Image (cartoon, rainbow, N blue to C red):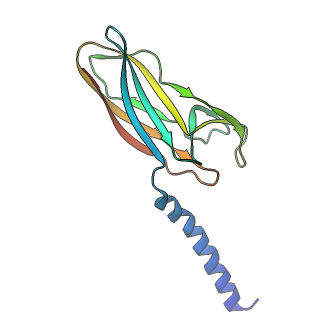
Amino acid sequence: MNRMNIFKTALLVLLLVCAGGTYAQIIGDPTTWTYEVKQKGVDKYDLVFHLSLKPGWHIWSLHPGGDGLQIAPSFVFTDSATLHRNGKVKETGKPQVKVMEGIDGKVTLFADKVDYVQSVTVKGKAKISGTHLYQVCNETICLPPKTKDFVFDIK
């Protein structure tokens, strides 16, 4: 191989490596989040995080399994004197348990849609806020974790 061929090959490899990172930035967020308050009784509510995913994308379960490198969704609520959380956030949907190339062990994930539900007790009117962190992936790439703000209005 002459020097020109080596240079062309090295340039091609460099371009391919750089293109992967650029591709992740171009994709954008394939998720749509909506938020709903469901009254369950006197001063008792379910705060529902509805997630819809574009086709081909998935989000890890709250308990993803695998080799421990999967980033599970997490929810942080701003402290409030009027808010009492009843237990932890729960997920509802159709989980998929599978073995994926490049991951040791079985993983649990959701494709298409999933709801995350936090049961709370709230005295009177309140605005419940915080952030949630999540990571979505397709069969070839995981996007960097993203943090979004949320607000639930209890009337």
Q: Is residue 29 left or right of residue 154?
A: right
Front residue of 8 and 30: 30
Confirm whether residue 72 shows in the render: no
- Residue 121, relative to residue 29: is it above or below? above
User: Picture coordinates of residue 43 (x, y %)?
Assistant: 31, 11
Quarter of the image for the N terminus: give it. bottom right
User: Picture coordinates of residue 131 (x, y %)?
Assistant: 37, 36
Residue sitting at 50 percent across and 36 percent down? 73
Front residue of 71 and 98: 98
Q: Is residue 64 left or right of residue 27?
A: right
Q: Is residue 95 left or right of residue 36?
A: right
- Residue 42, relative to residue 26: is it above or below? above
Residue sitting at 59 percent across and 41 percent down? 70
The mark tally for this picture is: 0
* Furthest residue in direction right, as rendered: 1
Quarter of the image for the C terminus: give it. top left
User: Picture coordinates of residue 54 (x, y %)?
Assistant: 52, 47
User: Picture coordinates of residue 116 (x, y %)?
Assistant: 48, 28
Front residue of 97 and 147: 97
* Furthest residue in direction top, as rendered: 42
Residue sitting at 32 percent across and 7 percent down? 42
- Residue 122, relative to residue 76: is it above or below? above
Confirm whether residue 148 shows in the render: yes
